[in-house]
Image (cartoon, grey):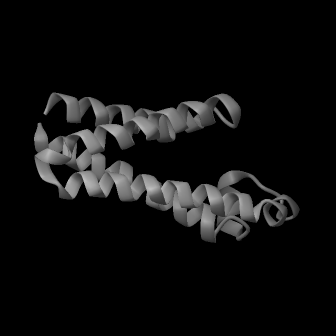
Amino acid sequence: MHIAANIMVALVALLHFYFLILEMFLWDKPRGRRIFGLTQEFATASKGLAANQGLYNGFLVAGLVWGLVQGAAGQPVQLFFLGCVIVAGAFGALTVNRKILWVQAVPGAIAMGLVLAS
């Protein structure tokens, strides 16, 4: 179970690294606009806000990786940052798009369940 938990935590970290790339570097590019359904005008106007959001995703990645490299002693760190992922995903689902619940909060909750079970 410990290996499955580590794999899932790593997958959540990779997912948030992908969000970082999308929000910080691809927000106003064709791929980013397509993924988020943005017009060029809106993407250009909101680019700074998206980069800030991407940076926060980077903090989640850093925390999850920090928890992983600590081994068993990192379980509390993993649980804290997975909790942040779940809360952010639930808030995003309520305020932006319900799809965020499935893309962000559910993987975080699965990872948290596995960490708690290991």
Residue 80 locus on image (x, y percent): 35, 39
Name the image quarter holding the N terminus.
top left
How far across and down, in percent of the image, does residue 54 sit?
58, 59
Q: Quadrant of residue 100?
A: top right
- The residue lying at 62 percent from left, 36 percent from top is 92
Residue 77, x across and y down, in percent: 28, 44
Camera sees residue 14:
no
Q: Is residue 85 above or below residue 42?
A: above
Quadrant of residue 27 in the image? bottom right
Q: Quadrant of the C terminus?
A: top left
- The residue furthest right is 41
From this viewpoint, is residue 38 visible?
yes
Determine whether, in the image, residue 52 is placed left or right of residue 40. left
* Drawn side of residue 56 relative to residue 75, left or right: right
The front one of 14 and 57 is: 57
> Hey, which quadrant is residue 79 in on the image?
top left
Query: Residue at the location (29% across, 53% down)?
Result: 10
- Camera-side residue: 89 or 4? 89
Q: Is residue 94 above or below residue 23?
A: above
The residue sitting at 79% across, 59% down in the picture is 46
Identify which residue is drawn at 88% across, 63% down. 41
Question: Along the horizontal axis of the image, is 84 left or right of 7?
Answer: right
Q: Is residue 4 above or below residue 53?
A: above
Number of numbered markers: 0
- Residue 101 placed where, x, y %? 53, 33
